[in-house]
Structure formats: structure tokens, C-alpha cells
Amino acid sequence: MSKIELIQGDITQLKVDAIVNAANKSLLSGGGVDGAIHWAAGSDLLEECKTLDGCETGEAKITKGYKLPSKYVIHTVGPIWHEGLKNETDLLENCYLNSLRLAVENKLKTIAFPNISTGVYRFPKELAAQIALRTVSNFLKSTKKVKKVYFVCFDNENFNLYNSILKSNIQSK
Ligand code: AR6
């Protein structure tokens, strides 16, 4: 069975070891998926985030999940798209890698990602999907410790893009 699964919906509903948050550098909540996660987790999440001293772009930090069905939240900060001139592709790859490394360090086996940077931060969706799928599948080949990674797409465009990339990868094997 594949270790990667595609889901369309709201990441805050998932009962996994950790959901990943597409946060900003302050880690003090915002809109989009970040706002939804803080709303569903309750104010204790913000209190813990205040102790973390922010997070650099491409890095990741972990908190408890509080009222969420998931045990933990891994907060990562995606790059803001600047026409590809600011190392955005490497930074987005780092978001996925550093989140997965944190999951391994914390012995977490199931992890769910949103489509980091593809909302307010305007990263082109197709390129972001290619980076996300390539980085995660390469990581999963290098370790048996993570058992399942869910990509949770909220909008139809991302869901269709992930679906077609996953299908074409299977066909080319
Ligand atoms: N579940 C899953 N995905 C979601 C949900 C949800 N409940 N809600 C939105 N998305 P964005 P960014 C998708 O803008 O581009 C925040 O204000 C959405 O469709 O949330 O990384 C932070 O504080 C999109 O595909 O994050 C930062 O300031 C994806 O999540 C900034 O936005 C990411 O969109 C980060 O921008």
C-alpha cells in the first residue's frame, strides 16, 4: 500500500500523529489554514506558540495539538513567492524536509501536510505540488519510521494537480 495518500478537505479534522501548519514567521496565527488550525485547537495553542520565539522560513517547530484530533502540530513557514528570485523552491523543499525530520525525532508515524505557500504566499501551485510530492517520496524511501503521509488539499485546483502528478508517477514506474 502506498505511504502517500491524497485527501480533499479540512486538515483540522484529521486524526493523525501530527498535522503541519503553514504558519508565518511570528508563529502567532494568521488566516488560511493557520487560522483554521488555531481556531480548532483553542487558545492554548497560541499560548504555547508564544514561547517558541518565531520560526525562520523553511524551518519547523512542534507543539501539542490541544483540542485538535491530531496529537501534535508541526508549524513550518513557507516562502512568499517573489517570482522565483529568492530561493523559494529550496525553501519550500526545506519546509517538507524539516517537518518530516521533526516527525522522526518525535517518533511520529502519521503526518498530514497542507499545500504550503500556495494560498496567501502565492507560490505557483503546480510547482509547489511537484516539490512537495518529490521531497516527501524521496524522504519516505530513506526511512521506515514514517508510515503514512497525507496531502490534504482544500481547493479543487490543488486536489486535481496532486491527483494527476501521482497518477503520472505511477504510470511511469
Ligand atoms: N485545511 C487544509 N488546507 C487549507 C485549509 C484547511 N482548513 N484552509 C486553507 N487551506 P494559506 P500560505 C489551504 O494561505 O500560502 C496565513 O495567514 C489553502 O487552500 O493558508 O502558506 C499564515 O499566518 C492553500 O492551498 O498559507 C501566513 O501569514 C493552503 O492551505 C500565510 O497565511 C495554504 O494557504 C501563509 O500563507
Image: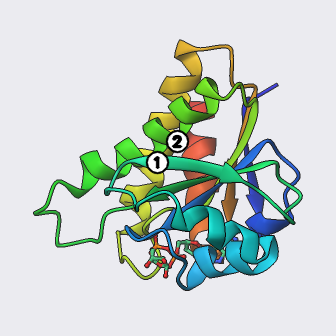
On the image, the x and y values in percent for residue 17 come to 79, 41
From where the camera sits, is residue 60 visible? yes
**Upstream in sequence: badge 2 or badge 1:** 1
Report the residue marked by disc 1. Answer: 60
Residue at 52% x, 41% y is 99
The quarter of the picture where residue 173 lies is top right
Q: Residue furthest left?
A: 85
Mark 1 residue type:
Ala
- CA–CA distance between discs 2 and 1? 6 Å
Determine if the C-beta at disc 2 is less than 8 A from ligand 1: no
From where the camera sits, is residue 134 visible? no
The type of colouring in the image is: rainbow
The quarter of the picture where residue 40 lies is bottom right
User: Is residue 12 or residue 129 the one in the foreground?
Assistant: 12
Q: Is residue 62 above or below residue 13?
A: above
Q: Secondary structure at mark 2?
A: helix
Position of 168 with respect to 67 (left or right) is left
Q: Residue furthest bottom?
A: 31
The quarter of the picture where residue 24 lies is bottom left
On the image, the x and y values in percent for residue 125 come to 43, 67
